[in-house]
Image (spheres, helix red, strand yellow):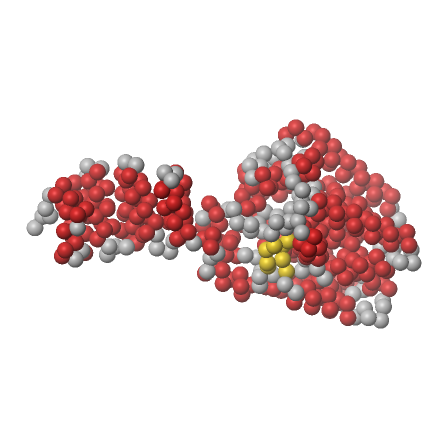
Amino acid sequence: MSAPAASSSRETLLRWLLAIGLGGLLLIVFSPSWGAFLLWSRVPELGGMIETRRAVSVLAQLAQPGSEVADQLHRAIQWRVFFPLIGRVLHLPTVVFFGLAHLGAFLVLAYLVRRLRSAGFTWSEAGASTLALGATSWFFTATGWLGYFDSWLALGLLVTAFSPATALLGLACLLTPWIDERFVIAAPLALLCRWLLPPSPRAIKRDVGVAAGLLSAFLFTRLGLLAHHSAAGATLGGYLGQRDYLDAPISRIIFGVWEGLRAGWFFTILGVYALRRQRGHSWALGGTLVATALTGLATAQDYSRSLTMLFPAAVLGLLLTRAAAPAWWPYLPRGAAAVALLLPAHHVMNDAVAPIFNLQHALHFVDQPPAIAMPELYELRAFHAMARAEYVKADADLALAIKLAANPASPAKQRGILAASQGRWTDARIYFSLMAKHDPKNPDAWLMCAQASHALAEPAVARTELNRALELAPADWRTRPDVARFLAKIGPPHK
């Protein structure tokens, strides 16, 4: 192998290793909620958690791509069919399917490292800059909320803005809208970045023509041919008519804007400043940034997430600043990385703010689940539902309590009593047997099993279970009125 080839191979390997290391660091500092993922895998009924709610709808799309989405909050994903089709055709396991978003995150980091190194960045500059650009909303959403493929949206925008190959630009414009339609809104900004970064491709007119043609074809298909198959919220009118997404305190909107790019805002602003001598270019970039940001905020509940559409401008600003080589340049990447890693991060929505925790905190919640996973909560809800004669709801709550409880004896008892009160003795015996299994020294558990067996006309089984209860119970237990009545009904125990 020649020396230049060996050097190129070593460079490529180091770029990949750096990207993987940076991704691992970001996952430690800004950890996904592994506890929520594990909880949902064990108890699918808890899919309403913010970390997993969209995943429920995406799995429905995986089963039938393009079908109407039942969850009104996520109806916009009806035609985001690229990954559901991939998963369906390849028969991907669920874990692998959702892991595609994490794979996309590492590919974005690798692309950034490659692009920055090609622009002359040192290893430390490339690493610090990639950390600052990675610790932003696209990474947090793609890795922290199942069913969100924002990393691939970010990758499509980067390819559109910075890949010199027209073929790759065309591939991004062909596929990315079927991952996330916001690509169509953000594409003009990405193409503007492609034009503004010197030296812009000689075939810029051809590139813009290819992008415009492919995006027009998507819009014709999506809003024309498929419009009559779309539920409310999956069409242009649905996006704009569902709710007023800007109906939130201005402080929250500003906070959401910051959390969208975080330290990447330094690069974005510096990019506009770097073009100050080309006033028309500077105004074009600034105006397109503002228009894209406002469109994103007005059409999405997730404020911070919507700012992913500005991601190419942050990269452009970084490249333009590096090219200008100001005296303070060496401090910028490291300072931005420090800000990105040290400042707390959040998902900001128009109606809520969700903090993002580090790995240590996330692992704590694997063993200490949140309130939504407390079995006592569902058992208490079941009591109130039974008091209102809402027996179906009570049964569902008790079923959840049984799944969630480390020892399900208590909710199993209540579910057995509910089933017995409705004459469902077969079900009642199942639940009373579960109670006895987890609380085997409780005579009342065996008494209830015996009562269910007696009601099912299985006297021998009922006698065995009653004898077990009598063996465990104190001497005066049989004088209790309910026990005495059952003993009178079934007869005295065999000596």
The quadrant the N terminus occupies is bottom right
User: x, y percentage for residue 122?
Assistant: 77, 68
Residue at (63, 34) in percent of width and height: 232
Provide residue 278's location: percent of width, then percent of height: 91, 55
236 sits to left or right of 468: right
- The answer to whether residue 343 is above or below residue 252 is below
Residue closest to the eye, 233 or 31: 233
Q: Is residue 94 above or below residue 337?
A: above
The answer to which quarter of the image holds residue 216 is: top right
Image point (14%, 47%), residue name: 484
| Residue at image coords 78%, 65% | 121
Please indicate, yes or no, whether residue 260 appears anywhere in the rendered image.
no
Residue 87 visible somewhere in the drawing: yes
Q: Position of residue 81 (x, y in %)?
A: 63, 39
Q: Which sits in the foreground, 322 or 383?
A: 383
Q: How many marks?
A: 0
Q: Which residue is rendered at x = 56% and y = 51% of the image? A: 51
- Judge from the rendering whether residue 208 lies leftward or rightward of residue 247; answer left or right: right
